[in-house]
Image: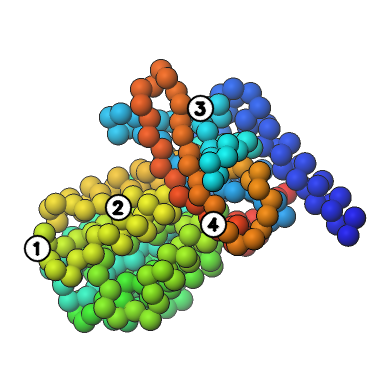
């Protein structure tokens, strides 16, 4: 037991020493640790050992005009867990390849909207990192994978657009089952950063999974969920609340375009958001892995930048903290 504890401490020390390379000097990393667009690999030096209880946060920072803020330093951030200030031990901003699931409602009410949604998917792919890997999950009362058999992920805009556009729109809506299946498929990826984009009216009339079950799955997975609500203003079945809740809990954003032709620009905005996020890491001052929910709040204080806003996930369950994908142990 004593040997195992000593080994664990050695691993912790190595990772914290590595983190110090990036946050030990004010702004030392700024402009230097940003991987160029199209970079095909996630640097091995950034991978985090599964033996370390490092809580990772993906954070979007915007200035008062809604523009991304690209060059903040470690001292500009404050991270609180259950109201207790935490020590930031890892900070980076880079455009690394991610895994994205496009989760598209194909119930009867979506029939007139699918051509625009397929076009938006094409624009999203074209605005994303060329090395991203993506998949499609289509759903009505049944949930199915959109890509051809044998193709798990793709970065082809034509292939992904076809996967959405060729599926028939009919029947009821199993939104929660579709999100659950998509979260499961994300686990087949070895990418550190995972995203879902859910396009639906938010209604659910056919799922086996409950809303609360899916919320817990999403929070435990560490996946960022963006939602796009498409419905008529007087639609009695629309449920924008669940779309907002999914996005808010996971650090994503909920969008409700007023016009159908705005879906393309919304998806382009999501692609830019994904590519302009900070990653923060800290080891909680509360070491208990007791299954309790820990709330997270991140503040940014940079007086010369005006009032900045930051968006990240709202918390995690201790003991269920997601780990990097397969093969992501520290080198």
Tell me the tag on residue 293: 4
- In the displayed structure, does residue 136 sit left or right of residue 302? left
Tell me the tag on residue 254: 2
The span from disc 1 to disc 4 (Cα, nearest Å) is: 37 Å
Q: Which callout, 2 or 3, points at the residue further toward the start of the chain?
A: 3
Which structural element holds mark 2? strand
Q: Mark 3, residues whose alpha carbon is within 10 Å: few (<14), some, or many (≥20)? A: few
**Which mark lies nearer to you, 2 or 1?**
1
Q: Which callout, 2 or 4, points at the residue further toward the start of the chain?
A: 2
Q: Which callout, 3 or 4, points at the residue further toward the start of the chain?
A: 3
Q: Which callout, 2 or 1, points at the residue further toward the start of the chain?
A: 1
Which residue is disc 1 drawn over? 234
Q: Are marks 2 and 3 in contact (CB under 8 Å)?
A: no
The span from disc 3 to disc 4 (Cα, nearest Å) is: 26 Å
- In the displayed structure, does residue 298 sit left or right of residue 200? right
**One can see residue 128 in this view:** no
Q: What residue is shown at x 46% (from left), y 31% (from top)?
A: 300
């Amino acid at each position: 037991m004593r040997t195992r504890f000593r080994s664990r401490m050695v691993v912790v020390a190595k990772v914290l020493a590595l983190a110090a390379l990036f946050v030990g000097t004010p702004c030392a990393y700024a402009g230097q640790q940003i991987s160029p667009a199209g970079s095909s690999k996630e640097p091995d030096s950034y991978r985090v050992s599964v033996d370390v209880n490092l809580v990772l946060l993906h954070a979007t920072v915007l200035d008062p005009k809604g523009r991304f803020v690209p060059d903040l330093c470690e001292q500009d951030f404050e991270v609180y867990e259950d109201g207790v200030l935490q020590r930031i031990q890892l900070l980076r901003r880079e455009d690394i390849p991610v895994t994205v699931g496009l989760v598209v409602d194909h119930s009867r009410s979506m029939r007139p909207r699918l051509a625009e949604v397929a076009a938006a998917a094409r624009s999203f792919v074209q605005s994303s990192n060329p090395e991203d890997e993506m998949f499609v999950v289509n759903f009505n009362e049944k949930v199915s994978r959109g890509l051809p058999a044998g193709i798990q992920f793709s970065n082809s805009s034509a292939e992904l657009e076809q996967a959405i556009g060729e599926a028939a729109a009919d029947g009821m809506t199993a939104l929660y089952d579709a999100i659950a299946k998509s979260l499961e498929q994300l686990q087949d990826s070895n990418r550190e950063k995972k995203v879902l984009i859910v396009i639906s009216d938010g209604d659910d009339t056919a799922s086996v999974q409950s809303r609360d079950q899916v919320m817990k799955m999403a929070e435990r997975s560490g996946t960022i969920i963006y939602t796009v609500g498409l419905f008529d203003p007087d639609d009695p079945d629309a449920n924008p609340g669940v779309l907002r809740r999914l996005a808010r809990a996971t650090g994503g954003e909920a969008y409700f375009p007023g016009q159908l032709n705005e879906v393309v620009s919304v998806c382009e905005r999501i692609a830019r958001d994904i590519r302009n996020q900070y990653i923060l890491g800290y080891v909680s001052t509360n070491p208990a892995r007791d299954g309790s929910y820990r709330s997270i709040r991140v503040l940014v204080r940079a007086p010369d930048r005006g009032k900045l806003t930051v968006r990240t996930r709202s918390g995690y369950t201790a003991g269920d903290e997601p780990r990097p994908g397969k093969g992501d142990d520290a080198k």
